[in-house]
Image (tube, helix red, strand yellow):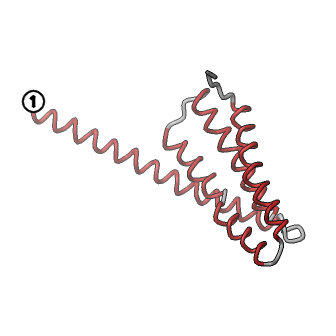
Amino acid sequence: MAEEKKREETSRDLSLRGDVARQYGAVAVGGVIGALLRELLEVAVPPVHGFPLATLLINWSGSFVLAWFYTVTIWRFKVPQWLRAGIGTGIIGAYTTFSTFAVETNALLMHGQSATALLYVVLSLVGGFLIALLGSHLGGERREIG
């Protein structure tokens, strides 16, 4: 009896390690994909009069896709946790970039473009939030109000 329990515990431990390894692998592969997608867009969309349009579009599209994806996978379709992590944390996490947003905002301020920096901050934060709400809505979010 003790030997059977030990085998079950060993099997469960191996299964958990396999799940963790699968999730880390999915995040790593997704991270490579997301970083490459971001780099492609950064190269394809140059700044407009110093305004970092590429980063704004990256963060907006990432906010939309992440909100839509998580809403769909919570309310409509069961998706394994490793896949959710690979897409959400991996692809979208590597694709979007708060640090670049912060550095670009600082650069605008350092170059005396305070109005452009303010516009960038407002569009990024308010726009990102509203676009995430749209993604959740289109994903079919269902919440009870009350």
Q: Does residue 33 appear to the left or right of 78 in the view shown?
A: right
The residue drawn where x is 65% and y is 60% is 98
Residue 97 percent across, percent down from the top left: 66, 60
Q: What residue type is labelled 1?
A: Met
Under tag 1, what secondary structure?
loop
The image shows residue 88, relative to residue 80, as above or below, that is: below
The residue drawn where x is 84% and y is 66% is 116
Residue 9 percent across, percent down from the top left: 22, 38
Residue that badge 1 annotates: 1
Quadrant including the C terminus? top right
Q: Does residue 93 appear to the left or right of 56 in the view shown?
A: left
Residue 143 percent across, percent down from the top left: 62, 25
Q: Quadrant of residue 133?
A: top right
Quadrant including the N terminus? top left
* Extreme-bottom residue of the structure: 111
Residues 118 and 141: in front is 118
For the question of whether residue 46 can be seen, the reply is: no
The image shows residue 59, relative to residue 3, as above or below, that is: below
Q: In which quarter of the image is residue 130?
A: top right
Q: Residues within 10 Å of mark 1 (few under 14, many from 20)?
A: few
The residue drawn where x is 82% and y is 65% is 44
The residue drawn where x is 33% and y is 41% is 15
Residue 13 percent across, percent down from the top left: 28, 43
Residues 87 and 121: in front is 121
